[in-house]
Amino acid sequence: MAIELSKVSKTVQSGAERLTILRELDLTIPDGQFVAIVGPSGSGKSTLLGLIAGLDAPTSGRILIDGEEVTRMSEDALASLRGRKLGFVFQSFHLIPSMTALENVLAPLEIAGRRDAQQRARSLLEDVELTGRAHHYPSQLSGGEQQRVAVARAFANEPSILLADEPTGNLDPRTGRHVFDLMVEMNRRRGATLVLVTHDHELAARADRRISLRDGQVVSDEGGTAAVSGGDDEGRRGEEDEGPRDERDEELEAARP
Ligand code: ADP
Ligand code: MG
């Protein structure tokens, strides 16, 4: 699904001062695009993701997701949009500690009332290569494994948009790369617009498009005219066999609302 921001500003009161976090941001992310957001700490990256997710409201401006104005939705409509169409991956994993890996992935599927919940949760765990860890609790998993569970969970309800806030920030570079590869692979296989905040310029270089934020403004935007995910992406495909093309295409179609 496409994401459109027009003249989005966010200001907060900080003591006696008024702090501007985002300044009149104009941004259009087409359906299926993989965008990396980079920028120094404090530049407004997390705030931007929170606004797209409708977790927070802008001070002014409009945000449209798939043509629907999130800035005018009720809390209920927003919660429903998040549950049906958005997936999140955070820096600090955010798994439920009292649930196993499988149960963490199952939870959103059961909430959505899916009959194939068990089967789908297992297939998602297989996608992130954690079949052997299904019954482990988060505390029994490494950071990289926990993040792979979080990635599987984020894809559970076939989100049209996946938002990831420094998903590799707490992982060593090698593990981080693996989690990143999985997200890109899942993005292609399961189909979604992917907005990824990262400090890692090497990872950002593999996105369709890179947007740099500084002091709440876009200071550079490159690659935006490139083909969207699923197009010519040889450069980041890696070696793995992806299975029959038409099967993935069907799944992609099924993922569309
Ligand atoms: P980034 O993710 O790029 O590091 P953030 O979006 O988290 O940046 O924050 C941008 C700036 O806004 C930071 O200086 C942060 O301290 C400030 N900020 C974020 N949320 C609030 C808030 N609710 N109240 C006051 N300041 C905030
Ligand atoms: Mg942040």
Image (spheres, grey):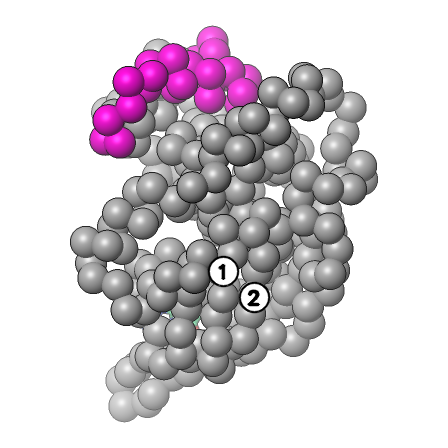
Q: Is residue 225 left or right of residue 146?
A: right
User: Going 61% across and 20% down the picture, which residue do you hit?
Assistant: 247
Residue 3, label in figure: 1
252 or 166, nearer to the observer? 252
Q: Is residue 20 above or below residue 196?
A: below
User: Going 72% across and 47% down the picture, which residue do you hit?
Assistant: 206
Q: CA distance from mark 1 to mark 2?
A: 6 Å
Question: Do the CB atoms of the residues marked 1 and 2 lie less than 8 Å apart?
Answer: yes
122 or 198, nearer to the observer? 122
Residue 28, label in figure: 2
Residue neighbourhood size for the residue with mark 2, other residues' Cα within 10 Å, grouped as few (<14), some (14–19), many (≥20): few
What secondary structure predominates along the stretch shown in magenta?
helix
Q: Is residue 75 magenta?
A: no
Residue type, label 1: Ile
Which region of the structure is painted magenta?
Answer: 111-133
Residue type, label 2: Thr
The quarter of the rendered structure image containing the C terminus is: top left
Residue 85, label in figure: none
